[in-house]
Amino acid sequence: MPDRTNQPLNTLPGGPLRRGDQAVLATLALFGVASILGWWATRGGGRGDLVEADRADRQEIIFRVDANRAAWPELAQLPGIGETLARRIVEQRRRAGPFRDLADIPRRVHGIGPKKFQKMRP
C-alpha cells in the first residue's frame, strides 16, 4: 500500500471526509432541515398563521421621562423635542439645578413655548 502520510488532505482519494463521516453530516443536515420545517408547520406556516409585522395590530407606546434625570437622547424622544432642545434642557438643568416641576421647563429653556410644552407634557 502506498504511503499517504505526506500528501495534503485534498489530494486523498474520496476527499477530506470518509464515507462514514459524510453520512453522519448528511443525516445531521437532513435532521436540521426537518426540524425547521416541523417547527414552521406546527406554528401555522402552511396555513399562513405566522405573525407578519405588516399585518400586526399597531400598539401605542407610552413612556415617561424624568426631566431631572434623563440624558438628552431620552429627552429627544419626546414629541416636539429634538436633539437641540434636549441638549438645552440638560444644559439648563446642569447650570441652574433640577427643575422644581414640569411648568419650570418652559420658563427656563429657550425654545420650549406653551404649545410645544403641551405636546411633550404627557
Image (cartoon, rainbow, N blue to C red):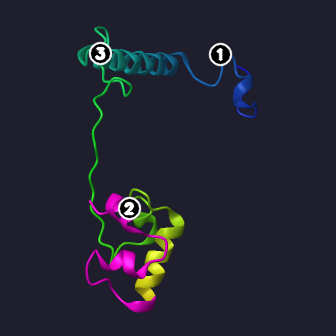
In the image, residue 104 lies in the stretch drawn in magenta: yes
Question: Furthest-top residue in view?
Answer: 47
In the image, residue 30 lies in the stretch drawn in magenta: no
Which one is earlier in the sequence, the residue at label 2 or at label 3? 3
Question: Label 1 crowding class (10 Å Cα cut-off): few <14, some 14-19, many 20+?
Answer: few
Instruction: Read off the residue under disc 1.
Output: 14
Q: How many marks?
A: 3
Where residue 56 sits: x, y (%)?
30, 27
Where residue 22 sits: x, y (%)?
52, 18
- Residue type at mark 2? Lys
In the picture, measured across the screen, residue 45 lies left or right of residue 15, that is: left
Q: Secondary structure at mark 1?
A: loop
Q: Nearer the viewer, mark 2 or mark 3?
A: 2
- Residue type at mark 3? Gly
Q: Marks 2 and 3, Cα distance to the nearest angstrom?
A: 55 Å
Q: Which residues are magenta?
A: 95-122
As drawn, 96 above or below 28: below
As drawn, 15 above or below 81: above
What residue is shown at x 66% (from left), y 20% (from top)? 15
